[in-house]
Image (tube, rainbow, N blue to C red):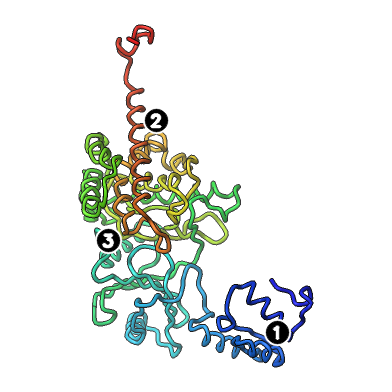
Amino acid sequence: VVESHQGGMPRPNPGIYKMCLEHLGVQPQESILLDSSSQNLKAAAQLGMKTVKVDDPEAALKELETHLGFPLRGFVPYTRSVRPGMEIPKDRLQKFLADVLGAHTTAPLELRQFDHGDSTRSYLVKFGGRLLVLKKEEEPPAGPSGPCVSREYRILKALAEAGVPVPPVLALCEDRSILGTPFLLLEHCAGRIHRAVSLPAVPPRRRGACYGAMANVLARIHSLHLGAAELQGLGEHGNYIQQQVETWTKQYRAVETHLIPAMERLIQWLPLHFPESQKTTVVHGDFRMDQLVFHPDRPEVLAVLGWKFATLGDPMCDLANNCMSFFLPAHFGARRGTEGAQSPLAEEPEFRTDQLLPKQLSWLWGSVQLERALGLHYFPLSFGWESCEADQECSPKDAEFVAELAWDFAIKEGFRVFESLPPTKLLARHSSTWAG
């Protein structure tokens, strides 16, 4: 904040504008001054600044939007202007929406793009007073498995009917003549999204309730009756963890650039230590804090987002994937947490059931299962797919860090198993009898 009276240079003294430019670190042509005084605007214009005269606020706002090249009104949190190269034809979309929704409006359709999320292109659409979400399939599909909006459409419909909080599904369009690729249309679910699992914006006394809500909704997902929810065909029954390890090992081999010793040890160790028994439930596939839309004023999950990796598998993988956030450094974006802190999720009573987490096991066991089942997910992704947020950079050093972290969990799991074994005569010997 620059105050002219404190600087001794009241407007229209050009010095006050120069001071503002210096504080902002911009050139005159990179700035815009809004003022109702023609005299003040003239002094700024003489320095090369762009100016907007404010007589009518609405007219001034329109002029400012013209200078900026993007709209300022109708802002929706977690969105941004559409990225270059990701524009979609508004005229064809407007006709489709009018036909499908049975609503006709003379107001122009407005588009924005969500500023985080999965690789499917997601847009916020303002049409006839309604806010909609459009998820457009990429061509070709991005990532190792590739998105498929038609599959996600069927999943969301089934989950909604089973009582899982998801955004209401409106339509699926597989006609490529409209936007070039299939797309999914949803109702926009307004609420609060927490980017960091440590919940820095939430008062400490309220964080536990948010973690409890997160645990509750994940337990609901894992408790779905597959037959009743018509989700039997979502994936194969059994061997989910084995398939994950095999798949991500192949993906890692396809993109590896140098030898990572910890990774090589993991690739050998993981297949030898699969869990003896695995449950089969619906698994989200990428469950974490920033996939949840919370109520603005209370710890209630309004919707679970990001279902493109959903399948049938071991529920421990979802739990472990979420716990992993507490061990990654801050630059891993949405996965940042409080490194080394205890994860609250696995201690919630919703997971202390026979259906999910046996009482004798700690949350650390869940994290170890992450390294067994999904840990390899991070290593190929660290070389450029999607483990870091779009505006963050991951490097081979990150892959090494997570590989070493995974191996550290594997070692700890080995000691846990070792300590659970009944003592034998050999183990009962006094240390003084050992050589050396």
Circle 1 residue: 14
Q: Earlier in the sequence, mark 1 or mark 2?
A: 1
Mark 1 element type? helix
Q: CA distance from mark 1 to mark 2?
A: 72 Å
- Judged by depth in the image, the label closer to the viewer, 1 or 3, is 1
Cα distance between the residues tagged 2 and 3: 37 Å
Give the camera-side residue of 225 and 270: 270
Q: Residue at x 41, y 71 (%)?
A: 187
Nearer the viewer's eye, disc 1 or disc 2? Answer: 1
Q: Is the residue under label 3 in contact with that under label 2 (CB below 8 Å)?
A: no
The reply to whether discs 1 and 3 touch (Cβ–Cβ < 8 Å) is no
- Residue for point 48% across, 67% down: 78
In-image side of 98 versus 241 (left or right): right
Q: Which image quadrant: the C terminus? A: top left
Dot 1, how many residues are within 10 Å of its Cα: few (below 14), some (14-19), or many (20+)? some
Secondary structure beneath disc 2? Answer: loop
What is the number of the mark on residue 143? 3
Please report whichever mark, 1 or 3, sits nearer to the chain's N-terminal start.
1
Q: Quadrant of the N terminus?
A: bottom right
Question: Residue 265 location in percent, x, y?
Answer: 26, 38
Q: Label 3 amino acid?
A: Gly
Residue 251 higher or lower than 34, as above or below: above
| Residue 297 position by quadrant | bottom right
Residue tagged 2: 360
